[in-house]
Image (cartoon, rainbow, N blue to C red):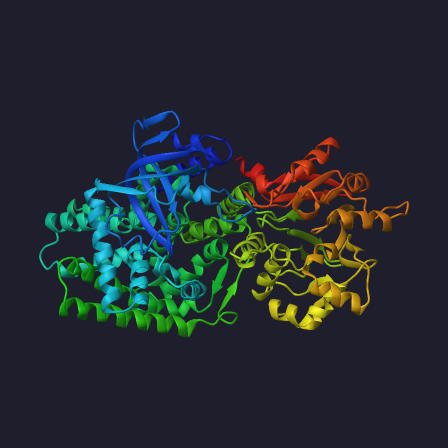
Amino acid sequence: MRRPAVYIALFFMAAIFLLDSFAGVKLYDEGILPEHDGENLTVSGTILSCVEKSEGHLQMTVAVESFRDEEGVKTLTGSPEKLLVDMYSMPGKGVSHMTIMPGRGITVSGKVSLPETRRNPGTFDYRRYLMTREIYAVMKGENGSLKTGRVRDRMRYFAADMRQRFLTSLEEYTDEDTAALAGAMLFGDRSGLDEDEYEKFRKNGTAHILAVSGLHIGAVYGALCLLWRGRKRWGFAAATGTFLVFYCFLADFSPSVVRAVIMIIIHLAAKLLYRRYDILTAAALTALIVLAGCPMQIYNTGFQMSFLAVAVISFLTPLTGKGMAGKIAFMFFFQLVMLPYTAYTFNCVSLSAFIVNIPVIAIAGVMVPVGVSTMLLAYRLQGPVIQYMSDIFSGCAKILAGVNDAAYRPGMLSFDAVSPNLWMILLFYVMFFIMTSEMFLIMRVRKRWHEIICLVAVTTVISVGAGKLADDSVRDAELVFVDVGQGDCMHLRADEDGIRRERNYLFDGGGSIRYDIGKKILKPYLLKNGVSRIDGAFVTHLHTDHYKGICELTREGMVKRIFVYDGNRFREKKICEETGLDAKQITYLSAGQTVNIGKKAYVQVIWPQKKGDEEYARMMEDREDENASSLIMRVTIDGVSVLVTGDLEEEGESQLLTADDSADSVLDADILKTGHHGSKTSSTEPFLDRVSPLAAVIQVGKNNNYGHPSPETLKKLEERKIPVFRTDIEGAVMVDTDDGRIADVSTVIQKDGT
């Protein structure tokens, strides 16, 4: 069957990707606000959305119409520009305050900046995500500068008011958890959900019900069809279309909601015009409409999943039959086909999802219409009716949570998964759609095997080539200096000696008292780049910015062994408690030892020397002495050496120079990981002259409060013409080796072209 709209949509999407990724054609207009990066502005406009991210933290999307800078007030010509504004230290519940609502006018002052781009290869790109929402600048609002005005967008304000009244009523009649679940299921707002509870849904593969999607819109549409008893003609179409467009306002125009609403409107039009409705053609037309409005939507995960799901449904439906057995078979195969994409995107595989999604979707099919009906009634009514409907919703929510909890068996039924190579994902889906198509069935029945072979060969070559070109992960670099903010972390890949198996090691792992570096940065980085386990983690010393990330990653079950300085034997019990490892998984090191970690890869421990128990006891009590007892290691892989210096400072460097008096200096290295984040108390001139590196890497956080790296250190490196790579400016630094030399050094920012 010919579907020209499908081919046009595929061609259009391919053109967007090629123009954006390879031709460098800008398919969007950033506007004026990004040009004021780093400046303090006062902006005026209309609130489009408002979410309370955490207590005191309010995040708003503002359609800016004018702004004031040092030169005066400037009015934006054309359409307003979207700006994401973060307000901190807001008193009380900011979102529930009637003066801070979508649709109202707003004036706020703060520092404008560009959104953060990806800092490590293959990981989440916040800037590109905001681009899919047509947001190109962000602002950190000044406390006390926010002022709201009159209502300027009545439809948006009405939708927000209705939504907030409903959630407030639901919280009063039931409890806070039920209201948070309703906010996620009905409006896609997960800010109120407990993080551990959301993790259960994510691990079970049922998190899709917490993001408004075609499933939810389909349930609403089904309920409207049941309620409309008369003939479903123009009146029904007008009423349904109007309500569904209004629902887009309620769900803040989520891509999956917009897709579902447009497809239902096409379905209604087909009925009115007595035309046959083809789901794949409708999806293609919808994709064209969405991408015409914002081409960058092609990178939105919601857009990708939504249209991929529709395509899979279209191709699977004719193959699974009718009746209950057919529906169960369809559910099973649908989840099986979607599994590669979810593993690639979310790094999680759930076996329980194949079973638990059946009751979960059935329960959600009841909860969504009940919730929407309660919302509509609660806007004007209160009392027994709302209480009764709230109780129904709450009862369903408890059943849903109970079913989800019963299926939650991490490590048994759900597993972390490394992202497959992108070319594998493309090849899988291209082959699936070809082999389930009518064209392939005809070719197979007619035994046109030569055509089938040619088709498979061509699609394989195209899929593999396109996948390799588009893949932004790093699976070949032997060394990656991972950006963990204000902290150190180096990832090394080595082949196991005599076996073609990759071994992975970390040297430090960053850490923060305010953020889970191990779970939020290291784990996603590793899984996105094909690493499921770390064979060993070398910790230079136990300061937070070097050690805490390793502890967090170890508790996630991703580290087999850690290596620490010999003096830490006195802290063995505490280390076991912090990491969750047992004593047999801790290796103690001191100067003179060499650890073979793979084929052509080994670690030489240069410092500190082994000492007596009394000296160890004194050192362990003196936390200020921790930097001086940093493990100093010379790491060699494929003939390229890296000097890992931890937080080594001037005194330690002097001791090293004194101890290293041989003609064949172990301090000589191709790459220097500068000590103590490039502080002025490290990288002395005699030390730099002895090491004589070809390149230096400074691992440091953006806008840190320590003054790292110091101008003095940068000047000394510049005077010696040593190229410097900084994670705060350039993101992760990747090093490729080739027969004893550095073949290439690249950075994430350089690769992304930003």
Q: Tell me the residue at 40%/70% (across/down).
A: 355
Left or right relative to 296: residue 636? right
Is residue 3 something one can see in this rendering?
A: no
Q: Nearer the viewer, residue 361 or 269?
A: 361
Q: Tell me the residue at 54%/48% (across/down).
A: 122
Please count the marks in the image. Answer: 0
Q: Nearer the viewer, residue 31 or 496?
A: 31
Left or right relative to 185: residue 455? right
Q: Tell me the residue at 44%/33% (across/down).
A: 39
Left or right relative to 492: residue 183? left
Name which quarter of the figure residue 629 lies in.
Answer: bottom right
Q: Nearer the viewer, residue 85 or 506?
A: 85
Name which quarter of the figure residue 420 lies in.
Answer: bottom right
Quick one: which residue is furthest to the top in this view? 71
Above or below for 517 versus 273 = below
Q: Position of residue 606 (x, y in %)?
A: 80, 54
Above or below for 517 versus 11 = below
Is residue 388 something one can see in this rendering?
A: yes
Above or below for 482 versus 561 = above
Q: Position of residue 61 (x, y in %)?
A: 34, 43
Q: Position of residue 697 (x, y in %)?
A: 67, 42
Quick one: which residue is furthest to the left in this view? 230
Above or below for 281 versus 561 = above
Q: Position of residue 344 (x, y in %)?
A: 50, 54
